[in-house]
C-alpha cells in the first residue's frame, strides 16, 4: 500500500479527551469548543474569535465582519483555495486576483500594490503550503487584512507566529491542515472592537453552527503538541530538501527569513509531471497535485493573467510530510525525491 500524501496527526493518546466527551454526552458545541478558540487566540495573540462548522461559513462571516459590502473589490492570491472565489462572488464582492512569486508561491507584493490602486477594500493572504507570506509588507497599504494560517500554523516570521499579524485570522481544521478537528474552521479577531462585530455577525447568521465539543477536543490535544509537531515537520522538510538537491527539480523557497512549517512537501518539477508521479507510486509513495483546487486551476476569469500561479498548477506536486511518518517512511520518500526522473 502506497504511503498517503495526507495523514491527520492523531495519536492514540489524543483520543482520551474525545472519549471523555462521548462518555459525558458533550457531543455538541459547548465549553470545549470555546476553549479551543481561547487556546489558539492565546497562542497567536488575538483578542478572541468564533468556531464555525465549515470554511465557507467562516470566510463569509470574516468578510462581513470586515465591513465589506457588495461591489467592494478585494485582493486575493491566485493560489488561494477556489472556495474563496466562490464565497466572494456569492457575496457580490469583486475579486482582484494577484499573481504569486514563482519561487515561493506566495502572493506577490508588487501585484498587491498594483491592484490596491483599483479601489481595493481589503487584502486576503494565504500562506501557501506553509510558506509564510510577507503580511507585514502588505500592511503598508492601509487596508484590512484577512490572513489564512491553516497551512502555516506553527511557523515563525522574526519572533512572531504565523497568523498573528492580520486584522482577522482564518484557520481551517480540515484533515489536510496542520491542526485538524476533522473539519470546521476558526475565525479570530486581532482587536476587541472587531471581535465584537465578528461575534455579532457569526451569532446572528441563520447558518451559525460552532464546532462540536467532540471535534474541538481533538483540536485542543493537537494544539498542545503543536510545538513538537512543528519541530518534526521542519526536520523532515530539511531532509527532503537535501534529497531533492540530487535531482533536477526544486521545492518552493521563501524569500523571507522565516521558520516555515510545511503542511506537505512541494516539488516544482522541471517537466514530466506524469512520469514523476508514476515513478513515485511504483516506489509506494503517493503524490497529489499541489494546486488542483485553487483559483488559478479552476478559473478562466480573474486569474487568467496569473502566469506564475498557472505554471505552478501545472508542475507542482505534493509528497507526504507529517509527524506520523516513521523513520523508514522518511528514508523511502527521500530516496524517491533524490532519484525523480
Image (cartoon, rainbow, N blue to C red):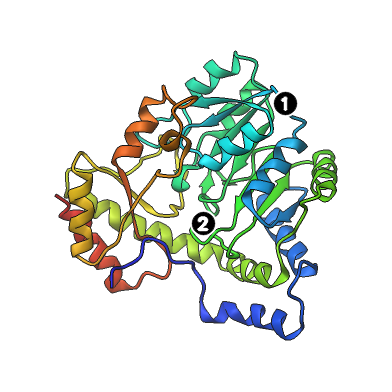
Give the camera-side residue of 101 and 260: 101
Q: Is residue 283 left or right of residue 10?
A: left
Residue at screen point 51% across, 62% down: 175
Residue at screen point 67% across, 53% down: 186
* Residue for badge 1: 70
Give the camera-side residue of 132 and 51: 51
Depth-wise, is mark 2 or mark 1 nearer the camera? 1
SS for callout 1: loop
How crowded is the residue under tag 2: few (<14 C-alpha within 10 Å), some, or many (20+)? many
Image spot of residue 33 (x, y percent): 74, 65
Distance of label 2 from label 1 (alpha carbons): 30 Å
Image spot of residue 109 (x, y percent): 50, 25
Pointer 2 or 1: first along the chain: 1
- Disc 2 vs disc 1: Cβ atoms closer than 8 Å? no
Q: Is residue 67 above or below residue 248?
A: above
Image spot of residue 171 (x, y percent): 61, 51
SS for callout 2: loop
* Residue for badge 2: 177
Image spot of residue 234 (x, y percent): 41, 57
Total marks drawn?
2
- Specify whether residue 245 is in view: no
Q: Which quarter of the picture shows residue 272?
A: top left
Q: Is residue 149 left or right of residue 255?
A: right
How crowded is the residue under tag 1: few (<14 C-alpha within 10 Å), some, or many (20+)? few
- Specify whether residue 210 is in view: yes
Q: Is residue 271 left or right of residue 62?
A: left
| Residue that lies at the very extreme toward the bottom in this rendered image | 23
Amino acid at each position: 500500500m502506497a504511503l498517503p500524501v495526507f495523514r491527520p496527526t492523531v495519536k492514540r493518546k489524543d483520543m482520551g479527551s474525545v472519549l471523555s466527551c462521548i462518555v459525558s454526552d458533550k457531543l455538541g458545541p459547548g465549553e470545549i469548543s470555546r476553549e479551543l478558540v481561547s487556546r489558539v487566540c492565546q497562542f497567536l495573540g488575538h483578542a478572541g474569535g468564533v468556531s464555525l462548522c465549515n470554511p465557507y461559513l467562516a470566510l463569509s462571516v470574516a468578510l462581513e465582519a470586515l465591513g465589506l459590502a457588495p461591489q467592494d473589490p478585494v485582493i486575493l492570491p491566485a493560489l488561494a483555495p477556489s472556495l474563496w472565489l466562490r464565497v466572494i462572488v456569492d457575496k457580490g464582492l469583486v475579486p482582484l486576483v494577484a499573481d504569486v512569486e514563482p519561487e515561493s508561491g506566495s502572493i506577490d507584493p508588487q501585484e498587491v500594490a498594483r491592484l490596491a490602486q483599483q479601489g481595493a477594500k481589503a487584502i486576503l493572504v494565504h500562506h501557501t503550503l506553509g510558506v509564510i507570506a510577507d503580511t507585514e509588507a502588505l500592511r503598508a497599504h492601509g487596508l484590512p487584512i484577512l490572513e489564512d494560517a491553516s497551512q502555516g500554523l506553527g511557523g515563525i516570521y522574526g519572533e512572531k507566529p504565523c497568523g498573528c499579524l492580520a486584522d482577522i485570522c482564518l484557520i481551517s481544521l480540515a484533515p489536510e491542515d496542520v491542526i485538524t478537528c476533522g473539519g470546521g474552521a476558526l475565525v479570530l479577531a486581532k482587536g476587541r472592537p472587531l471581535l465584537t462585530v465578528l461575534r455579532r455577525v457569526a451569532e446572528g447568521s441563520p447558518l451559525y453552527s460552532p464546532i462540536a465539543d467532540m471535534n474541538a477536543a481533538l483540536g485542543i490535544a493537537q494544539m498542545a503538541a503543536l510545538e513538537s509537531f512543528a519541530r518534526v515537520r521542519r526536520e523532515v522538510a530539511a531532509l527532503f530538501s537535501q534529497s531533492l538537491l540530487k535531482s533536477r527539480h526544486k521545492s518552493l523557497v521563501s524569500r523571507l527569513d522565516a521558520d516555515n512549517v510545511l503542511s506537505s512537501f512541494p516539488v516544482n518539477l522541471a517537466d514530466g509531471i506524469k512520469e514523476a508521479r508514476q515513478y513515485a507510486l511504483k516506489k509506494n509513495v503517493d503524490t497529489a497535485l499541489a494546486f488542483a483546487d485553487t483559483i488559478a486551476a479552476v478559473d478562466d476569469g480573474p486569474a487568467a493573467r496569473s502566469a506564475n500561479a498557472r505554471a505552478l498548477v501545472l508542475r507542482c506536486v505534493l509528497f507526504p510530510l507529517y509527524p506520523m511518518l516513521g523513520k523508514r517512511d522518511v528514508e523511502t520518500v527521500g530516496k524517491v525525491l533524490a532519484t525523480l526522473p
